[in-house]
Amino acid sequence: MADVNRGNRPLSPHLQVYRPQLNSMTSILNRITGISLLGAAVLVVWWLMAAATSAEYFELVDGLLTCWVGDILLSLSVLALWYHALAGVRHLVWDMGIGLDPDVSDKMGWGIIIGSFALTFLTIIAI
């Protein structure tokens, strides 16, 4: 039977031991943007439900989503969408075994960050 005395075993290293690296931070941010996109989807569904409900309710919801706070929220949602999409492509490339070297991986991380801001800027200009 396995030894159940777990009090004498050392703990594995945790966040206080390791220095944050670009790849770990981009991976964590990928998860955060995925969760935040769920909130953005709720806002879009709310807007569509308001459009299906009545003209007065739609004007209220549309006014909230197009005021300066709504513009900031929707712009951050576009940034999260682009970041999450580019990070997903990077994970697909990694799944093929490409770009796993630390230097290439760091370049891909910076490419995701810069690319998501550039694509967000282009998306906001296009709209």
Image (tube, rainbow, N blue to C red):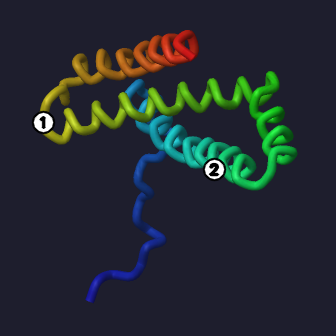
Look at label 2 and name its amino acid. Val
Percent x, y of residue 80: 53, 31
Residue 50 left/right relative to 104: right
Label 2: which secondary element: helix
> What whole-number distance in Å separates the C-alpha atoms at marks 2 and 1?
38 Å
Residue 62 falls in image quadrant: top right
Q: How crowded is mark 1: few (under 14 residues within 10 Å), some or many (20 or more)?
A: few
Extreme-front residue of the structure: 55
Q: Which mark is residue 45?
A: 2
Q: Is residue 63 above or below residue 75?
A: below
Callout 1 amino acid: Gly
Q: Which of 19 and 68 is in front in this view?
A: 68
Q: Mark 1 points at which residue?
A: 97
Q: Of the two numbered discs 2 and 1 on the same chain, state the one appearing first in sequence.
A: 2
Above or below — where is 68 with respect to 42? above
Q: In this view, does 46 lie to the left or right of 103?
A: right
Q: Position of residue 126 (x, y in %)?
A: 52, 13
Label 1's element?
A: loop
Relative to the observer, which residue lies in front, 13 or 42?
42
Residue at 62% over, 27% down:
76
For the C terminus, the quadrant is: top right
Relative to 75, 5 lies left or right: left
Question: Which of 11/62 is in front?
Answer: 62
Instruction: Identify the residue at horizontal 14%, vertical 30% (top origin).
Output: 98
